[in-house]
Amino acid sequence: MPWTPTVASRHALELLVDESGLALPITQWPLPRSAVKRALYALPRELPPALDAARERVAAELRAAEGPGLSLAVRGRAEALSGFGDEATPGSWLGGRSGTLSTHGLSAQIGVRVDEGTVPSHADAKLRLYETAIAIEAFGTQLQAWAHRSWWGPGWQSSLVLGNNAPPLYGIGLQRASAGQSDSRWLSWMGPWSYEFFVAADDNTIDSYLVGMRITMRPFSLLEIGLSRTAQWGGQGRDESVNSFLRMLRSSGVNANGAAEQAEDPANEMAGLDLRLGCGSIFRCAVYAQLIGENSTRNHPSEFLGLYGLESWSADGRHRWFAEFVATICGGATGYHVKQPCAYRNHAYPDGYTHAGRWIGSAVGADSRVTTVGWLDVESGTLLRLHYGSIGARVGLYALPDDPVHSGTIRGVGARQSWTWGQATLGAELDWFRVDAQEGPLQQTRLGVTLRMPF
């Protein structure tokens, strides 16, 4: 079954990777629960107290994910700069899931939720599948059908290619069942690794599909590498033939410029790589970057969007700090040959790189530059993030370039606080930002509480 950790458990997993050599990639979520369990079981029985507590935190969260649960969120409908672990869809919601049923290589879990829709300006009750998956495991691979979000990349605030700003996608795909080092002499050099391929329904005006491909590996103990590619393909008025699908997979004729070439363009593709490099025994820190090409030149990604970050953690495993800069601008990765508007847009897909009207990548939207600094205290359940930069279209939702109401200089803060009673968790959230837009200041404030408990 696919699984994505909470912020606290992701912190614990990174701590175990950096300080105990946990054989698990940590820049691609979700991963199969079984893969995470195998990696935990492979650790030495005796670990320093901070690492042992981290292992138990992850194990407890995995156990809780296998049981039935109920979630209720009561909050406002304003927008927010969502990061890893956040529920980005505005408004209140109610959700429930079954326990996991497993037998002979087959596992299943069903979940549903009712929310208020994806557009802050009006409530539109929507019933969705949520935390739902069916997985069949054979020959080291899981065949999955699911409803979930993905997070591809090392960022804590943003992912350029697949983040959690949009509602869950409904898809089918393949994923490696384990994530440890391969026994094959041809593949063992990759270290802990995983792959994923999926096709999902993309909710937009032409009802297209989103195709995703990623491979993540750690060939050296301190270096993790991820290669990602996504494509919006098909839809009303678009070629959905087998030949078109194969041309998309080969990147044949994509990102065309002329009218004749655009008529043969099979997809809107994004592709690139991300890196996370640990500092080793010198300091408790890691640096990371993500470069995603919006277009291609000679069948190679070009016009790169960029994300750069630095993270550190305390010796006792209680605290994590990070600083992250994201530039969702074609050429923004280097600052040379910058092109606007370009990012998250395509001639054939009028809604841009969105699902249900919301950006599939970073919540800052297209043509933006934003710096975030954050602090996590896992013992107290506190997360604080501060934001500063510029928005080129609109936070959260698709908008035209330089929207006079929603684009401009941005300042913001996000705070999370959680408490645990037995197996129940209560979380409080505060998000605020101000955009100094052309038509005047725009302020968004969102307060909310979320209760999660087993039943």
Image (cartoon, rainbow, N blue to C red):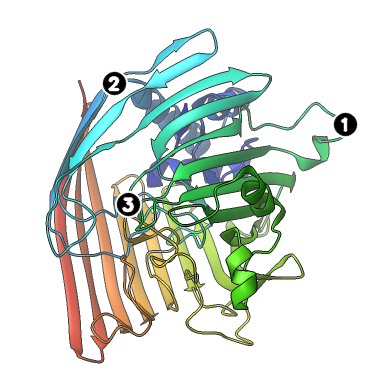
In terms of secondary structure, where does tag 3 sit? loop
Q: Which residue is mark 1?
A: 185
N-terminal of the two: label 3 or label 1?
Answer: 3
- Kind of residue indicated by mark 1: Arg
N-terminal of the two: label 2 or label 3?
Answer: 3
Q: Residue furthest right?
A: 185
Q: In this image, 111 relative to 36: left or right? A: left
Q: Residue at 61% of width from left, 54% of height from top?
A: 229
Q: Quadrant of the C terminus?
A: top left
- Kind of residue indicated by mark 3: Asp
Q: Nearer the viewer, mark 2 or mark 3?
A: 2
Query: Where residue 199 is drawn, which disc sits there?
Result: none
Q: In this image, 346 relative to 260: left or right? A: left
Q: Please report contact status of discs 2 and 3: CB closer than 8 Å, yes or no.
A: no
Q: Nearer the viewer, residue 188 or 143?
A: 143
Q: Image quadrant of residue 94?
A: top left
In space, the residues marked 2 and 1 are separated at their CA atoms by: 41 Å
Q: Please report contact status of discs 2 and 1: CB closer than 8 Å, yes or no.
A: no
Query: Where residue 98 is drawn, which disc sits there?
Result: 2
Q: Which residue is mark 3?
A: 86
Q: Residue at 63% of width from left, 80% of height from top?
A: 334
